[in-house]
Amino acid sequence: MNVDGVGELDTVLKAIKTEDSTYADCLESWKTCLEEKGKSISLKDFDKFWVNNYIRYDTCSNQDKRQAGRKCNTEVGIKKDIWNFDNSILDDLKAFLLFLSK
């Protein structure tokens, strides 16, 4: 799973998000800062970090943040209505899964 041949599942999730992602998107500035200081982060690790921040800070309610470990993690976040599973990026995956189910 990727987006235009780049990335993995987290890259896809980043592309199909449906909610405001201000907190997660601001990580781009952090990544730029790292690069300016001679450090780097892989695309895979960056996208995982982005998804975690999107779930925890952009889409988790203030009440749920009190129990963030249980209520604002990836396992719970994937079940929330914060992803557009009708996005065309997922068409190939859906076709593959339908093929396997036959």
Image (spheres, rainbow, N blue to C red):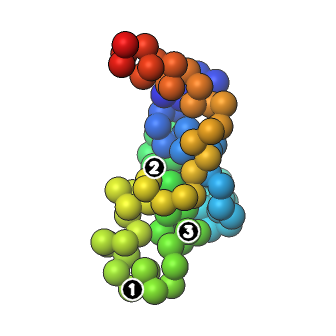
Question: Is any part of residue 30 visible from this angle?
Answer: no
- Whether label 2 touches label 3, CB < 8 Å: no
Q: Give how far apart the Cα atoms at labels 2 and 3 are.
A: 16 Å
Mark toward the start of the polypeptide (2 vs 3): 2
- Percent x, y of residue 34: 56, 55
Where residue 54 sits, quadrant-wise, is bottom right
- Percent x, y of residue 30: 60, 61
For mark 3, what is the residue? 59
For mark 2, what is the residue? 48
Q: Residue at x 43, y 80 (%)?
A: 65
Q: Residue at x 51, y 84 (%)?
A: 62
Q: Residue at x 39, y 57 (%)?
A: 74
The amino acid at mark 3 is Thr
The amino acid at mark 2 is Lys
For mark 1, what is the residue? 66
Q: Give how far apart the Cα atoms at labels 2 and 1 are.
A: 22 Å
Mark toward the start of the polypeptide (2 vs 1): 2
Q: Residues within 10 Å of mark 3 (few under 14, many from 20)?
A: many
Question: Is any part of residue 32 visible from this angle?
Answer: yes
Secondary structure at numbered mark 1:
loop
Q: Give how far apart the Cα atoms at labels 1 and 3 are.
A: 14 Å
